[in-house]
Image (tube, rainbow, N blue to C red):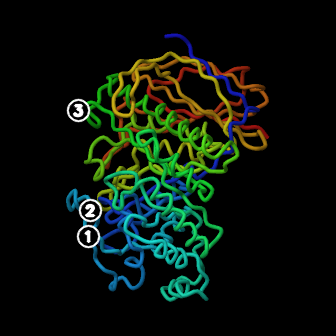
Amino acid sequence: MPRASVAVFPVKILGKIDSRIYGHFIEHLGRCIYGGIWNLEKNDFNERIIERITDLKPLIIRWPGGCFSDNYHWMDGVGPVEQRPVRENLPWSLLGPEFGPSETNRFGTDEFIKFCRRVGAEPYINVNVGSGTPEEAANWLEYCNGSIETELGSLRAKYGNRKPYKVKFWGIGNELYGTWETGHMSAEEYAQKFMEYHDAMKKVDSKIELVAVGADQRYPDWTKTVLEKAGKYIDYLSIHLYFTGVLPEEGGSEIKEDTKSYRRIIASSYKFQEILEWVRETIESVMGKNHGIKIAFDEWNLWWDFSQLLHANYCLRDGLWAASVLNKIIKMSNIVKMANIAQLINTLGVIQTNGDDVFNTAIYEVIKLYRENTQKNAISTEISSPKFLFEPLGILKDRREIPYIDGAATVSEDNKNLTVFLVNFHPKKDLPIEVEIPKLRSYEKLIIKEINGPSIHAKNDYQKNEITLSQREFHQLPEKIEYALPAHSISVMILTKT
């Protein structure tokens, strides 16, 4: 197999990276909240989960949904616990009690804010448009951000929280283009609703930033119409993407090495990039080049089986895919300013629990590696690599070749720290690679950190950890880095100078 090469261009800045691209999402679905974040026996936070989440250093967490948010009325979840009503968990109870157990409202607004503060994350609240009103949303905002002189700010103080929460990010509805969503409506109706919510909420707090519901090419007129009618009021446009295109006989972890489904999974990260590029082009075509609207990629993940809503142990294959998606987000950092993987715990979760037992999936380890080593500026790279072919399925409509090596690079604002993220998708072969970085010898140290396992199916569970993180350090650097990039690996090269 021919040698691959990566050229890094530190002076070609693609955009400033907002650390909120390493965000997360929690919803009242399955055991994400109750039995995950919330310990039902102790009626308090699950401390072992809090430790794992804190170690992940999440920047922003979205709540309460998702589809759940367009059925959620926030007043149900504040005040004395014993006085909070029990509600049906719509829409998830329609799938069965394990997906949507009765909503006790034990975990509400105050608990969410406390949770975010415990793990060091910024709160991002999604309001109810499907069955709610602008007034209800404005009241929720006043409860969170109002001074104690306001009616609802004083109610928050009565419940033990005198200081305003200062919640900055507010999502206006969820996937209302879809027939599955409570309150499903046309783009024209949504645009009108968005403006009504904008006006009502901005009267309460003019400093908040609002996230509007956007859609991809499957709903081609939605985003264009929403932008035409309400674009000047939008701060962020929300986009949700899941990859579901595996063959029926190759579900979940049973996907074999280098099969059609494995290649499709890997290739879908490139389709995600195309979709996000389409959204960017749509924004620019409607709003002009200097529009100021940012993309919130606030739901993304692999999802091909409803059982993953209850339990999802992502293996190394899925970690390779997640790393590739993160590479695409980094490269689009000039417009993608927030991203929230769905979800954090159990339900499609990067962390899995069973009572007090906890383990981190491969995707958790990948996000942690990227979160800890991303610098402020995304920079240009050129990658030459052997390729593989895949057949279309799901969102992948066309046959194409995909490089075995994927990557992205970032540099600090003072140019003293540079990181190169590299992924080798090949399920069996190490790939020799040359990495060219200008003035490489001016750097004093090179650290290579690598996530890997015995095969693409390697995974962690409650008994064992097959996903490993290794590290090597070099102090005498050549003019170019020549390296055998290990099979099915995710690596980061970290260069530093004083």
The amino acid on which the numbered mark 3 sits, given as a three-letter code, is Pro
The residue drawn where x is 52% and y is 84% is 152
Where residue 400 appears, x then y in whole percent?
A: 44, 20
Front-most of residues 356 and 19: 19
Label 2 crowd bin: few (<14), some (14–19), many (20+), radius 10 Å = many
Which numbered disc flags the more N-terminal residue, 3 or 2? 2
* Screen quadrant of the C terminus: top right
Which numbered disc flags the more N-terminal residue, 1 or 2? 1
The residue drawn where x is 39% and y is 85% is 80
The residue drawn where x is 32% and y is 47% is 312
339 vs 257: above or below: below
Q: Residue furthest top?
A: 2
Residue holding disc 3: 248
Q: CA distance from mark 3 to mark 1?
A: 33 Å
99 vs 289: above or below: below
Residue holding disc 2: 100
Image quadrant of residue 420?
top right
Front-most of residues 171 and 407: 171
Instruction: Look at the numbered discs 1 and 2 and tell me whether their residues touch, using CB distance below 8 Å.
Output: yes
Where residue 361 appears, x then y in whole percent?
A: 39, 45
The amino acid on which the numbered mark 1 sits, given as a three-letter code, is Glu
- Mark closer to the observer (1, 2): 1
Q: Does dot 3 land on a helix, a strand or a loop? A: loop
Residue holding disc 1: 88
The residue drawn where x is 25% and y is 48% is 307
